[in-house]
Amino acid sequence: MANLQMTGILEKMTGKDKDYRYMATSDLLNELNKEGFKADSDLEIKLSNIILQQLDDVAGDVSGLAVKCLAPLVKKVGEPRVVEMTNKLCEKLLNGKDQHRDIASIALKTIISEISTPSLAQSGTSTEIKCECLDILCDVLHKFGNLMATDHEILLNALLSQLNSNQASVRKKTVSCIASLSSSLSDDLLAKTTIEVVRNVGSKGTKSELIRTNIQMIGALSRAVGYRFGPHLGDTVPVLINYCTTASENDEELREYSLQALESFLLRCPRDISSYCDEILHLALEYLSYDPNFTDNMEEDTDDENHEEEEEDESANEYTDDEDVSWKVRRAAAKCLAALIVSRPEMLCKLYEEACPKLIDRSKEREENVKMDVFNTFIELLRQTGNVTKGQTDMDELSPRWLLKQEVPKIVKSINRQLREKSIKTKVGAFSVLKELVVVLPDCLADHIGTLIPGIEKALNDKSSTSNLKIEALIFTRLVLASHSPSVFHPYIKDLSSPVLSAVGERYYKVTAEALRGFGFDFKPYVHPIYNAIMSRLTNQDQDQEVKECAITCMGLVISTFGDNLGTELHACLPVLVDRMGNEITRLTTVKVNNTWLHVKLGEFKGFSIAFAVIAGSPLRIDLSCVLEHVIAELTGFLRKANRALRQATLGTLNSLIVAYGDKIGPSAYEVIIVELSTLISDSDLHMTALALELCCTLMADKRSSRNVGSAVRNRVLPQALTLIKSSLLQGQALLALQNFFAGLVYSENTSFDALLESLLSSAKPSPQSGGVAKQALYSIAQCVAVLCLAAGDQKCSSTVKMLTDILKDDGTTNSHLALLCLGEIGRRKDLSSHAHIETIIIESFQSPFEEIKSAASYALGNIAVGNLSKYLPFILDQIDNQQKKQYLLLHSLKEVIVRQSVDKAEFQDSSVEKILKLLFNHCESEEEGVRNVVAECLGKIALIEPVKLIPALKLRTTSPAAFTRATVVIAVKYSIVERPEKIDEIIYPEIASFLMLIKDQDRHVRRAAVLALSTFAHNKPNLIKGLLPELLPLLYDQTTVKKELIRTVDLGPFKHIVDDGLELRKAAFECVDTLLDSCLDQVNPSSFIVPYLKSGLDDHYDVKMPCHLILSKLADKCPSAVLPVLDSLVDPLQKTINFKPKQDAVKQEVDRNEDMIRSALRAIASLNRISGGDSSMKLKNLMSEISKCPTLWDKYYSIRNE
């Protein structure tokens, strides 16, 4: 039946009536698009012939449909038919009539775009010479170039000859063809191509148009092959620079093409172009102002606003010439400079000295498109400054941020001129520059706000202003308001508030939303205008969701700030807020809306929650009595929502409301809140748990809480808290909140101390279901017991301590462990010297056969000493001297004392310090690594307390003949460097080199200690080491290589085992580089590190590969231009890693470790694929093809890519 139908269609397609032919061809297209369509060999031949025949149809609409039929047809017929059709179309293209050539060309392109069988790629190779064929050949080469390797040389020779064609269109299309072919050329043929093109460019007597074509060809080659063009830059760059400077005045195209090629080199061959960067910088700056047909005689410093209109009239009558294309040179120069900025972060200071003034000056550019490129280039300079100096606060005179700050007055002056221009595009660009400036230097415009206000006013009030301009102006205004002191705006608030308020009434929602986000200043004369503007938006139901959310947030700020000035308006506004919230909730409950709508509404609910949190936190004590009960009920309902952010905001809001308005909230509301809170307490979300427990403490602390509230806490929350305390994940704010919760239970007198203590101690006992309690959980229980005892008073605390010491005397293992931890936590908070011989009882536990008991006893002794240093510290020091077997444990006790003192910023007596130091330095050379690590940590923490004494003493020992002593003092310095500012910083700064230069020590332990110290400096205090990095980095990189002298073979009898003593050092060195990339990117030269150091690390041991994958991912994101030139060499070790298979008898741990390694490598590969220009690497393409063919690898890669 189907064949009969097809026969009918084919007959109609050959009819005389063109309408019949059109309808029949349309029917055929529909049939071919059906999934179930199949054709036998006879039908395939008929279909192929008749569609080719229809291509020549005199009716254009019929031949157009025939072309569309080709796309599905080539997928449904056999390969021989497609080859036959392609050959016929090629014949028609080469030898057919002129009127049929275009349709044949389109038909060939359609076939090429659809076919995927490799053998068919040969079909396009018969195309030569003819201009129309070049288009098709370009498509063929782009898609199948790597499958035509045998024909590359023939094709290349044919195409290179066409670069000298007299027809400009042929030359242009030839450039595209060669570029498409070059990405799959071998290095030899690529070199041949480059040599030929450079020879053509450099030949004397070559016509200027051919020189331009060949320079275009150089740029296209560079863009196509990327880093592979690097080896040829030595021949190419000098030629291009020479043409730029020596070309005739009218040859702007030659300069444009040369600058475009240089731009491509900068982005794609950063390593090989390094030696030419200074020349290119000067060239780009020279041609940034290249304008031979126009002389700007205006006074540059003229900034007289009285002549503003006259200036605008003059600018309208400036010189114009349609034939003047010098603007193309300036645009190419701006883009070349932008490429230099993006690819050379190490040149940032030089760029500020030489390029920044020129860019500021070129804001007077008369061609708007070029001016936008100048703005974009300047924005790139600002962004690069932000990237390089991210996280840095101080500014020395050599830093890019300091150099930028010196230019701010000139930037503002220049931008102000642009804001007075008529062009909307120019003003938008000017605000974009200002926005980026405020992001990089948040407080830089404090002295210039007054000069910028007229520009903002004009942008918001001018009738010709577009929505885009208003949005940019409002975003800038909001950023400035957020980043500067409020006092800066006091003189200008009258000028600023009027246009912002008018923008609130804009019809376009994005303008309104940005205008609403701009509010937050505290000025009474503007209260009612601001209130009225926001209220009009708050009450309007028919508006965009973004506007609603901004209006809600703004109204919360207005009420909290101006509530005492609103009077009757307050009673009108609060019910509107609650009514809107209630209406939306009702709609949610009754209509059961879909997830998308729910997500939008949750944003609005969160806005309500935050708004009431702001109101509750206001010092004005806004009267909420008319809506309070309703608000509490609605917020309690929010706690049942699935959206985490909404629940978090609601917990904070409820806390604020109960603190501020607890006397007006009924006990029944408390009970409902407690029931909801109990469901939120879990170790699966510790942040939510902390907020819930804090709210619970607030409820219990309220003296008006009824007995029912206490009962609800005991029955609902306490069981959850006792379950939580056994979690090994409990830490930080959640643990602190849990301690406060148990203390609150005692203070509220709703639960007896004895019952609580028994519950806590019982929770440490192992259960049949879950087994033993985690070590971390015992520490959590001990801290809660200590807080509980202190809250109950001295009597209960003493009885508890006596009970715990009795447990120690009975010597029960599990109970002793917890008892020791509890004594330590209580002793840290309270002096236990009234309990005679408690230290002796604890030290007896050092004899226990169980390591955890000994460790807990050491912890307890140290913490008890913190409670009474004068009594217990001498005891510990004396024991260290006299008890050789217990030294390690006693040193841990001493460490607890020192660490607590450094955290609390307490000081020791001078005599104690001397005694401690003498003891610690005596143990620096201990054979036991554990002892040395404890000694180092103690020295480091004492250095925080007494840096003046410690730093010289540590420096003196860096020259000790004992390697262990040198390593210990360097690790001590590592422990002394913390994130917060400390007095040690300025004392250690001049001496850092003495410690870190031990990275070239002969002993591997010392070198590793220096690497770890450098890593800590880079993470916590990068500014202290930046000056040393040029000398340190080569030494650090050297530690990443495999040292044969550190590899030894251990004879184990039946077999030999190879031990690599340098493994830990290499791992530490790569991890240090990873840290430096985050904090000191401007000092690291990625190109010199990637090859050979990172490359060797990618092929190293498992422990080294993992940090190397992280580094590669980071470099691909932050410094793609450094990765591109060596991409091929990095693919091989990654491919080897993902293809590695564990042995058949491998244990589960080895299999899991290999899986982690493969995922890590795939994560790095995903980062490489995000690099712009990475597709020029054939090895990466082949690797991705291999991954896509392996379902297991592809599934892993796909999930990682979408993380």
Image (spheres, grey):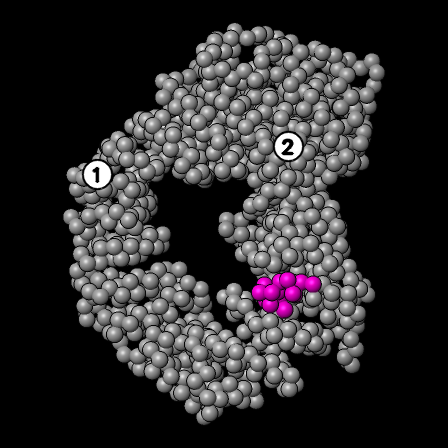
* Structural crowding at the residue carrying mark 2, measured as other residues with C-alpha within 10 Å and reported as few (<14), some (14–19) or many (≥20): many
Residue 658 located left or right of residue 452 = left
Q: Is residue 1155 above or below residue 1049?
A: above
Query: Identity of the amino acid at label 2?
Result: Tyr
Q: Residue at x 19, y 58 (%)?
A: 663
The residue under the point 54% across, 15% down is: 302
Indicate which disc residue 352 carries: 2
State the predominant SS element of the stretch in magenta.
Answer: helix
Q: Secondary structure at mark 1?
A: helix
Residue 499 in the image: state x and y as whole percent: 34, 26
Question: Dot 2: what SS?
Answer: helix
Query: Considering only vertical position in the picture, is 322 above or below 734?
Result: above
Kindly indicate the quadrant of the structure image that contains residue 716: bottom left
Residue 474 or 329: which is nearer the viewer? Answer: 474
Q: Is residue 1007 visible?
A: yes
* Res. 566 mark: 1
Magenta extent: 939-952
In the rendered image, residue 890, in percent from the top left (x then y), is placed at: 59, 80
